[in-house]
Amino acid sequence: MQHKPKRSRAIALPNSEFRARATEYLDFLAAWVKKPRQTASVVPSSRYLARLMVANIDPQGGRVLELGGGTGVFTRAILETGLPADMLEVVEINPAFARGLRRHFPHVSILETPAQIVSVAAAGGPGDYQTVVSGLPLLAMDRAMHIDILSEAFRMLKPGGSLVQFTYSTRPPVSRAVLDQLGLEVVRAGHTVRNFPPATVFRFTRRGE
């Protein structure tokens, strides 16, 4: 009795998901062409990086703020933790990305407000947020912008809350001088090579918390 060789099966994405992924990449590439310093990469972050970014979110722990929503890779991962959509707000100043986020996440509040003044538009007040998830390209920003963004983020965070930030460097994207000025600490929270480029995740907290 002869055994027929097994044929490998290709696993294809559903057409709707394939189109969505393709649209995400094209939108991201277009944004990079227009403003490479603002977008920082030619492709969206991977789901492996997204999992590292949301690892410490407690779905029952209160509001979450995302800075730089892009095409929604981190937004989707945040919601997959079980956090209710009405407890998430996403900051995105690129109008094309903001439109896409509203289309894909109709129950999430999308704020076209600069990260350094997000408190003027956020639904929650100072001290209401458990986590700030940042996809902002901090390495492309200067010290003054770092101070403004981090100051605003920690104004919104509750005691013990943290800001999670990824970077394509192996070192924190914020200088020790800025951390000392703001009374912050930073630890390396993870690294993945399953992203292009490979990325490192850092967690910022207030000193003594």
Image (cartoon, rainbow, N blue to C red):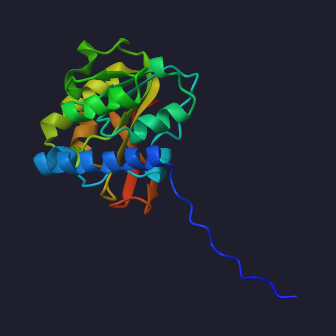
Residue drawn 50% across the image and 53% down it = 13
Q: Nearer the viewer, residue 2 or 158?
A: 2
**Does residue 180 sit above or below 106 in this rendering?**
below
Q: Which residue reaches farthest right?
A: 1
Residue 115 image offset from top left, x and y in percent: 23, 28
The quarter of the picture where residue 106 lies is top left
Residue 150 visible in the snapshot = no
Q: Nearer the viewer, residue 161 or 18?
A: 18
Q: Nearer the viewer, residue 87 or 24?
A: 24
Residue drawn 37% across the image and 56% down it = 199
Q: Nearer the viewer, residue 74 or 53?
A: 74
Mark count:
0
**Does residue 6 sit above or below 44 in this rendering?**
below
Residue 146 shown left or right of residue 51 in the figure: left
Residue 166 image offset from top left, x and y in percent: 35, 47
Residue drawn 24% across the image and 13% down it = 120
Residue 191 image offset from top left, x and y in percent: 44, 57
Residue 136 shown left or right of residue 32 in the figure: right
